[in-house]
Amino acid sequence: MPGLGDLNFLGPIAGIVTSVLWTMTSIFFSVAGRRIGSTVVNATRIALAIILLALIHRFVISESGSWIPAVQSKQLWLLALSGVIGLAIGDQCLFTAFVDIGPRLSNLLMTTAPVFAAVLSWVFLGEVLSLVAWIGMAITIGGIAWVILERGGQRSVPAPHRVRGVILAVAGGFCQAAGLMLSKAGMGHGWLADEQHLDPQAATLVRMVFAGVGVLPILVIARSRFAPARRVARIGRPATGFAFVVVGTMVGPVLGVWMSLVAADATDVGIAQTLLSLTPIFILPYAAFIEREHVSWRAIVGAVIAVIGVAVLFGEA
């Protein structure tokens, strides 16, 4: 078996790192939302991400010291679609589904994303997964679903918009998969020579700029529609909330999205998307040791199953 330094493992490792980063950012944004409100968090995270990504590109990535990545027109359109579909529309679908049907069922339905990703990358990029890869994906998704079902099985939350929530959660999974596939195409896979491929960090910056453009009308509509709604009690100092937004943005929308494109760049989109979906597994230690929640043997077994599936995917790397 190749060593960990083998480049074949770059994609899977980046996918797992992304899941860890997204687990951390979900915690940071949850803490921030309790102090300054979810709308403020959502409105500032992309703007901050664009600034931070531009600084990284200017001072770390770009050899010429340019603030703006050099991209072809086709790359620009593909990455623009990726940002709007994957980060703006997809996130809004998921956030609304959380309200309609709760996080448990929403996250369960979001496990359809790897299947969408595998099908889309096969149709548009010509990526064909082996039988072993499909088995690894199925085992991993099954373990994740097992954990999600157990963690939400204690109580039932009324869902007045259940049908809409289910549709939006599945749409969120599709948008996430389509965004990742479009990002890989935008980097040049499937139509440009390897030496002409765009760096994942530069692609992340372009994608995030258009995500910001795409999220503006969504925020305006959301604010105008839900403005009369009742106030949500907030705890803690607003300054602390903004500090968590900054840290959460660096961890998630900056490093996390960057690593997700590294994963897509280095391995099949279906495999990458599966490894990006491990947040429900990585949240278990936080729930057990920080939140002092009871983690049952069923959840532990689900986590072990997911890890077995990940091992199978590594074997295909």
Image (cartoon, rainbow, N blue to C red):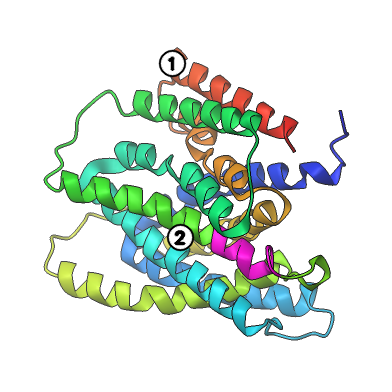
The residue nearer to you, when weighing 245 against 93, is: 93
Q: Which residue is mark 1?
A: 298
Mark carried by residue 212: none
Q: Which residues are magenta?
A: 181-191
Of 127 and 231, nearer the camera is 127
Measuring 70% from the left and 48% from the top, which residue is drawn there? 267
Answer above or below: position of 61 versus 268.
below
Q: Residue 237: tell me if it is visible.
A: no
Dot 1 and dot 2 residues touching (CB under 8 Å) = no
Above or below, 288 against 84 in this view is above
Distance of label 1 from label 2 (alpha carbons):
36 Å
Q: Secondary structure at mark 2?
A: helix
Which badge, 1 or 2, is on the more N-terminal residue? 2
Could you tell me residue 82's position as x and y percent? 51, 67
Quadrant location of residue 16? top right
- Position of residue 208 measured from the top left corner of the image (x, y, whole percent): 54, 72
In this picture, residue 145 sits left or right of residue 59: left
Which mark's residue is nearer the viewer, 1 or 2?
A: 1
Sort mark 1 into few (<14), some (14-19) or many (20+) by Cα contacts within 10 Å. Answer: some
- Characterize the magenta stretch by its predominant secondary structure: helix
Q: How many marks?
A: 2
Within 10 Å of disc 2 (Cα), the crowding (few <14, some 14-19, many 20+) is few
The residue at which mark 2 appears reads as 240
Residue 223 location, x and y as percent? 23, 72
Q: Residue at x 18, y 75 (%)?
A: 224
Q: Quadrant of the N terminus?
A: top right
Q: Tell me which amino acid carries mark 2.
A: Thr
Q: Residue 164: horizontal and vertical position, in percent?
A: 20, 51
Residue type of the residue flagged with mark 1 = Arg
Q: Residue at x 34, y 61 (%)?
A: 92
From the viewer's perspective, is 315 left or right of 144?
right
